[in-house]
Image (cartoon, coloured by chain):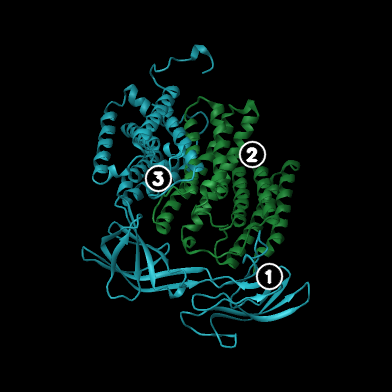
Chain colours: A cyan, B green
Amino acid sequence: MTEPTQKKILWKPPWSFAESAFIVTGIVLVGYALQLFLGRFKFDILIWPNNLFAGGILLFALFLLSLKSRSRFFQWLSGIPLTISLLTALVILTVIMGLTPQVTGNSPSQRTVIDILGFSRMTSSWPFVLVYFFTLVALGAVIAKRMKAFRWKDYPFYLNHTGLWIFLFAAGFGHADMRRYGMYVEEDTDYPEWRVYNDKNEVLELPLAIRLNDFTLDEYDPMLAVIDRKTGNAIPESKPEYLQLDSTQTGGKISQWEISIDKYLPQAVRNSDSTYKTVFMPGSCPAVKVRVKDKMSGKTQAGWVCCGNYAQLYRVIPLNAKYSLAMTRPEPKRFASDIEVYTRSGKSVKHVLEVNKPLTIDDWTIYQYGYDNEMGKASGYSSFELVYDPWLKLVYVGIILFASGSLCLFWTGRKKKGEVKDDHLE
Amino acid sequence: MITWNSFTGFAIPTIALWVVAVILQYSVRKQLWAQLSTVAGILLFAIFIGGFWMSLERPPMRTMGETRLWYSFFLASVGSITYLKWRYKWILSYSLVVAIVFILVNIFKPEIHSRHLMPALQSVWFVPHVTAYILAYSLLGAATIVSVVQLYKPDRINDEELSNFADNLIYIGFGLLILGMLMGAKWAKEAWGHYWSWDPKETWAFITAAAYLLYIHMRLQSRHRRFTLWLLPVAFIFLMITWKGVNYLPAAKNSVHVYAQ
């Protein structure tokens, strides 16, 4: 590259790095022109069956191109320099994306330069969409070229490249068909719920209904903390110390206070004399009887501490003018909804829905989303997220192929000395 | 019961064994003793991780301090294994020194609060997802050192054997990186409703993977050697942003991946 005698004339075939970089830069610039004139890319135009037609045309075009696989153009399209240029463009665009806070949903975008150029909605900006699409074309050409010279021993190549292509294809072209809704279902009602909210908070009716039989919430045991009476923050503020309560806990130390646990009641109700007793009922909450010794002053005091909930007041022990001993609210450990789902096709499925354990029915996936945080265990409703994604199966095909290919990398590695790797090259 | 309070008791002997291993490597001709000392340190450290795991009743992979345990463990293990295969002394001592640094950080700045595992993190994908990533980070970190050595010593830029060694680390590390990412995608679908949401952590994971993909493809042709070598330190910076940096990026303050704050 450095010696003038070796310098080849730009645009004289075969095209290499310089030409590829020019063309990819051109694509990005065209993208910005479209961005300025048309605004961001509207994925709605790829809604079913448009995405099927567009995808079919892409596949057919790749097939036609591969018929001329010896042509200079196809060699360039499936060559390393273009791959490098496209990857570089993707890295630059996504680095900008990673440094710019992204706007999601339908919040109206402000008209700063960052918004006009699409930096704040990178994945639906024209330059990103065009580079993504062109990557699909080039990656498709790479696969087509290697398919024409099929060798079994290239299986890691096929798994990796085909898996990635299918994933990018299904994720990109299928994006417009994806729907996400929220649903709130009340417990113990006689009829199921089928109305959902979209991200604009509009109510829609689904071909799918859910009845909530039971909602359960398990909580972790709470912790004791010394809090600043003014701010309510646990101390030391930079790294708060907590004393975990459980049935075996006997005591511990927070800052200058030695705490010993006399009695811990996970489900307690306050008596009229400000003591607590165990009662199993929805409004019960954890309470603990402690003795606290201030090692600085030598003063010891005893009393009850309770975190409180919607039904009961919290209770702290004032330690001095500045600090109090308090109990944290229990954190959720597991929440689950016993539901029954009815589809228009006449199916009915019973399932216990949990975080990380969604239910898939037809092309829908139903998720446990939330509950009435204020009411906790006594929550009268459970909220679900319903996601419709007919392209998901194809995405998983891509993921499985790509993952298998990644495993192959463990033993393929670099070839031994002297052996030339010929990926992408003829 | 092995809790965090026992950490120093395990960490100091581990460090001692590894320091002895590094000294023996360069002072005694026979490498067996250095190897034995390394392995003894790894075993001791593994006992701590195992016992700590049991006392926590959840995998110790949640807080920064906990993931650093694995980073130290895998660095020492991977260093040991690659030494056995390739016989580069420096790779073993490098991995041991970095592993020791991570242990020291954990002694002086543990960042390990007793925290509860929120429901979204309770998944079969948790352990394989995080382990694959940590292992990938260790291998890619080692490859970065190779590239820095080559960049620093101009006569080694065309050392094909050394480059191939770095490539072997990169291929395995990249394979693990992709496996970690795809397992994360499956997990995200189960927990958050979508396999890829361009959450800041996901965006930077994509950038990291794309940068290593750039390196792998540059190595398939022979031009621009220096540029190719520079890709590794740059990719590793992206990796560090993915791993730690996103916790501090203003663009990522709403990331669903930031748990430990």
Could you say which quadrant of the image residue A250 lies in? bottom right
The local secondary structure at tag 2 comes to loop
**Subunit under mark 2:** B
The type of residue carrying mark 3 is Phe
Percent x, y of residue A219: 50, 72
Q: Quadrant of residue A232?
A: bottom right
Residue labelled with disc 1: A323
Same-subunit check for callouts 2 and 3: no
Give the residue number, with chain letter if any, for mark 2: B88
At horizontal 50% and vertical 80% (from top left) the residue drawn is A284
Q: Is residue A153 visible?
A: no
Q: Is residue A161 left or right of residue B252?
A: left
- Looking at the image, is mark 2 or mark 3 nearer the viewer? 3
Residue at image mark 3: A402
Outermost residue on the left side: it is: A345
Q: Earlier in the sequence, mark 1 or mark 3?
A: 1
Q: Going 58% across and 66% down the picture, which residue do you hit? A: B56
